[in-house]
């Protein structure tokens, strides 16, 4: 995979299809994912591409999201929620529109919103980068998450950072009287064990 060409194509496409805030978020997520990948000894170029493309389906209408989603393997909640169905649809677009074949990239994009049990480090990095990139996210929250990533035991720090993100997500959903996907609760409970 030629990362430079893929990055150029992705950035050009994103500039033409995303609004300015979503573009800033995607660029920030790409940079954050790349930095975290380096820190954890993972492929930073692949993480950058995953970060660029993680929200590429956000430009689609709800109708188009659900149309594409109807052909994908969705978990409970994704098939009815336009805020979260973009993740599997973005993985689909990354493959179909940009020719991404790397399963590690596609899986990270696929699970960056809800997460899943037994996530890989690469998937966790994109999940976290999406929540803490500095261009559009809360910087105090970012600092709290980054504090856990300084843990000498990298796996422990990564898992604790994930737990903070899940707690914040659940708290936010409760405060807004929104449904919490069973998947989210199961993952959170699993992380406590």
Image: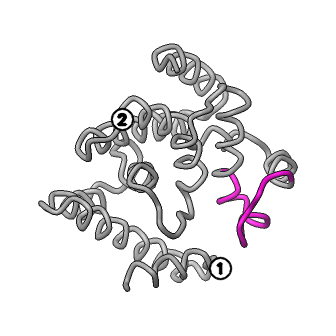
- Which residue corresponds to mark 1? 179
Q: Looking at the rendering, which quadrant does residue 159 occupy?
A: bottom left
Magenta span has 190? no
Considering depth in this image, is 58 or 67 the residue closer to the camera? 67
Magenta part of the chain: 71-86
Q: In the structure shown, which secondary structural element does the residue marked by tag 2 occupy?
A: loop
Relative placement, left or right, of 159 versus 131 is left
| Crowd class of label 1 (few under 14; some 14 to 19; many from 20; radius 10 Å) | few
Q: Which is in the foreground here, disc 2 or disc 1?
A: 2
- Disc number for residue 43: 2
Considering depth in this image, is 123 or 24 the residue closer to the camera? 123
Relative placement, left or right, of 130 versus 95 is left
Q: Residue at x 39, y 38 (%)?
A: 28
- Above-or-below relation of 54 to 97: below
- Between the residue at mark 2 and the residue at mark 1, the CA separation in whole angstroms equals 35 Å
The count of marks equals 2
- Above-or-below relation of 133 to 111: above
Q: Are marks 2 and 1 in contact (CB under 8 Å)?
A: no
Residue 24: percent from the left, percent from the top? Answer: 46, 35
| Crowd class of label 2 (few under 14; some 14 to 19; many from 20; radius 10 Å) | some
- Disc number for residue 138: none
Relative placement, left or right, of 170 versus 99 is left
Quadrant in the picture for the C terminus: bottom left
Q: Residue at x 26, y 47 (%)?
A: 40
Residue 120: percent from the left, percent from the top? Answer: 44, 56
Q: Residue at x 61, y 82 (%)?
A: 177
- Above-or-below relation of 79 to 53: below
Q: Residue at x 63, y 22 (%)?
A: 13
Considering depth in this image, is 132 or 139 the residue closer to the camera? 132
Query: Which numbered disc flags the more N-terminal residue, 2 or 1?
Result: 2
């Amino acid at each position: 995979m030629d990362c430079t060409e893929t990055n150029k194509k992705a950035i050009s496409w994103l500039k033409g299809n995303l609004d300015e805030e979503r573009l800033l978020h995607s660029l920030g997520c790409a940079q954050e994912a790349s930095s975290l990948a380096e820190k954890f000894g993972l492929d930073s170029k692949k993480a950058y591409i995953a970060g660029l493309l993680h929200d590429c389906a956000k430009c689609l209408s709800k109708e188009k999201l659900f149309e594409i989603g109807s052909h994908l393997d969705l978990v409970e909640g994704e098939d009815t929620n336009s805020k979260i169905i973009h993740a599997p649809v973005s993985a689909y677009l990354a493959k179909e529109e940009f020719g991404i074949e790397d399963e590690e990239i596609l899986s990270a994009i696929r699970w960056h919103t809800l997460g899943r049990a037994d996530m890989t480090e690469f998937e966790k990095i994109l999940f976290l980068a999406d929540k803490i990139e500095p261009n559009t996210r809360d910087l105090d929250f970012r600092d709290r998450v980054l504090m856990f990533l300084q843990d000498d035991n990298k796996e422990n720090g990564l898992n604790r950072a994930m737990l903070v993100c899940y707690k914040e997500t659940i708290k936010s959903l409760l405060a807004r009287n929104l449904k919490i996907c069973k998947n989210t609760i199961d993952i959170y409970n699993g992380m406590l064990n």
